[in-house]
Image: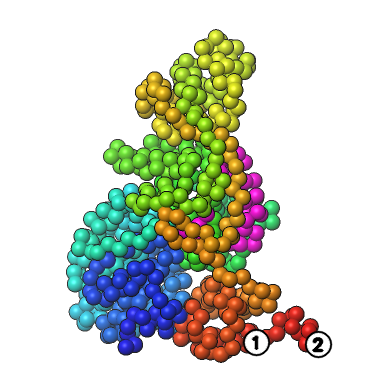
Amino acid sequence: MPGEPQQILEEIFGYDAFRGEQREIIEHLTGGKDALVLMPTGGGKSLCYQIPAIVNHRAGRGVTVVVSPLIALMHDQVAALHENGVEAAFLNSSLSAEQFSITRERMMRGELAMLYAAPERVTNAEFLADLETLSTAGLLAGFAIDEVHCVSQWGHDFRPEYIELRVLHERFPAVPRIALTATADALTRAEIVGNLDLGGAREFISSFDRPNIHYAIAEKRDAKKQLLRFIRERHVGESGIVYCLSRRKVEETANWLSEQGIPALPYHAGLDANTRRVHQDRFLREDGLVMTATIAFGMGIDKPDVRFVAHLDMPKNIEGYYQETGRAGRDGEPADAWMAYGLQDVVLQRNMLERGEAGERHKQVLRGKLDALLAMCESTGCRRVQLLEYFGEPAEPCGNCDNCVSPPETLDAGEPARMLLSCIYRCEQNFGSGHVFDVLRGNETEKVARFGHQRLSTFGVGAEYGEQQWRSVLRQLVARGYVRVDPEHFNVLRLAGEWRPFITSDAALPLRKAVKAARASSKSSGRASAGTGRAVVEPAPLDAAGEALFERLRAWRREQADARDVPAYVIFGNATLHEIALCRPATLEQLASVKGVGDAKLENFGAAVLELVAEPDDESAIVAA
């Protein structure tokens, strides 16, 4: 039947099989039941509500309202649906009064399969009144709430407007809802269920593993130069995102990368709306552009070929880290998540948390989340294991993170840590790290002499360790809460937390002895994540003729995208172009068998693609001559 999910998957989206729990989720939703779906970025969340929406619309059950947090995301998803021949639209502030009126009338007539809108619009009185009219007429098929982690006050993307979406269930209890996110630990899931009254919803929790992503955390020395080396060695000419904590750093990093020959643009909330829109549009449409940004950029970004995400500053928690790094490699091909991390990151995040206006209970939760991220940064074991276990998913070492590829040499820094705590105590908790390190290393500076600290019992006891090693020890002690850096008193070191039990114990403190650069390329093939057994297999390599065809296809795609004012991947994704270049279809029937080529795209672009495939490459033309 034309309304069956499998046929819609093949005809409209150009795929022959569902992935993971997609089929089960779709059947659950089309059966009129609620669902909470946790699926990693790139796992195919959108199909979980788009296919039921099309099924319902073909059956005459009207429109599915999709709650989306960002205008740019609405535009891109609607554009992609249009290219696939699906009736979809959005209502937001980018529309003129006439366009808004036309779209609303189409919705009320039941012409749309999907209507995208922001939570603020969905919950206003006029829109709710329209929904009442649709519901009475039997033309309100369902609600899809995307990026639902925004409802959580513990999360990194909290949007208070999301809490008001509870009204949808109160006003329309018989209308099925699907809530979707890529990131939610147990606490966040409980808050989503409570705030949106999803107690009766079935939870579908896919693996959080993204085996195509290579995780690496580098000890911060000169972060900008480290970033430049990382891009030049692994991602020249490829799209990426660089996250910074401050707007100023975003601007400086974008300018510096541009000066070094890496095309880069800034994005943060301090830029005017038009500049942000232009920069985001360029990032979505152009190849090889790097966006430097605060976390104001990225939620819902649907660009599949982001090859790396880099952090020059540490995020606040693992959810933020996972959400942001998950924007790399949405197409399933190898990608990098790289972060430069140092003592100042620990100090800054600790101070920001403690200075915040949240209540003590809220701060305690946030401390736990920060501690989990710090533990992952400091770990000498598998990054992926710690990442997945945070979300309650057991895993084994992956063989595809920096610590697995190039295991760090470690030493037990328990004794040096106790030396450092003792020295801070004997310096009366009144000096910064530089002076304390001088005392430990036995450096007879003018300041040491002035305060008589050469007579302390800790003077010179740590001469065998260099300043870099002492900084590593201090970073771990700050991360564990035994030391805090007081920014209001010239960054002096203060003892904190359970420092006394630690200093009187013989507890170990594993510490990296030397930092080794991971040599494995993110583009190596056939890597597997041992925790799940899922392999990352690169597509078959193209020969010279195939590469030439692939580039012709990309250039043609760019022209088509510009003419339609949509991102290039809306026309065809890189994986689809690669398969075309590999199998070189000669007929429309052969082209239709390529993943990502649905009926509408076959009709719109099939003839042009076949002409490109039939063109002789330069080498064959020379031979023929």
Secondary structure of residue under mark 1:
helix
Which residue range is magenta in the image?
Answer: 211-239
The kind of residue on which mark 2 rests is: Ala
| Image quadrant in which you'd find residue 109 | bottom left
Residue 344 shown in magenta: no
Q: Is residue 238 above or below residue 365?
A: below
Q: Secondary structure at mark 2?
A: loop
- Residue 442 x, y percent position in the rendering: 60, 17
Of 255 and 64, which appears nearest the observer?
Answer: 64
- Relative image position of residue 493 (x, y in whole percent): 47, 25
- Tally of numbered tags: 2
Identify the residue under disc 2.
625
Is residue 569 something that shows in the picture? yes
Local crowd at mark 1 within 10 Å, few (<14), some, or many (≥20)?
few
Residues under labels 1 and 2: Cα distance? 17 Å
User: Residue 222's x, y, as percent?
Assistant: 62, 41
Color encoding of the figure: rainbow
In the displayed structure image, the side of residue 132 where residue 49 appears, left or right: right
Q: Amino acid at mark 1?
A: Ala
In the displayed structure, would residue 597 be above or below residue 458? below
Q: Is residue 236 magenta?
A: yes
The quadrant in which the C terminus is found is bottom right
- At label 2, counting other C-alpha atoms closer than 10 Å, the crowd grade (few under 14, some 14-19, many 20 or more) is few
Which disc is residue 592 wearing?
Answer: none
Residue at image coords 60%, 77%: 582
Front residue of 398/512: it is 398
Identified at 47% across, 47% down, the residue is 383
The residue that label 1 is drawn on is: 614
Please report contact status of discs 1 and 2: CB closer than 8 Å, yes or no.
no
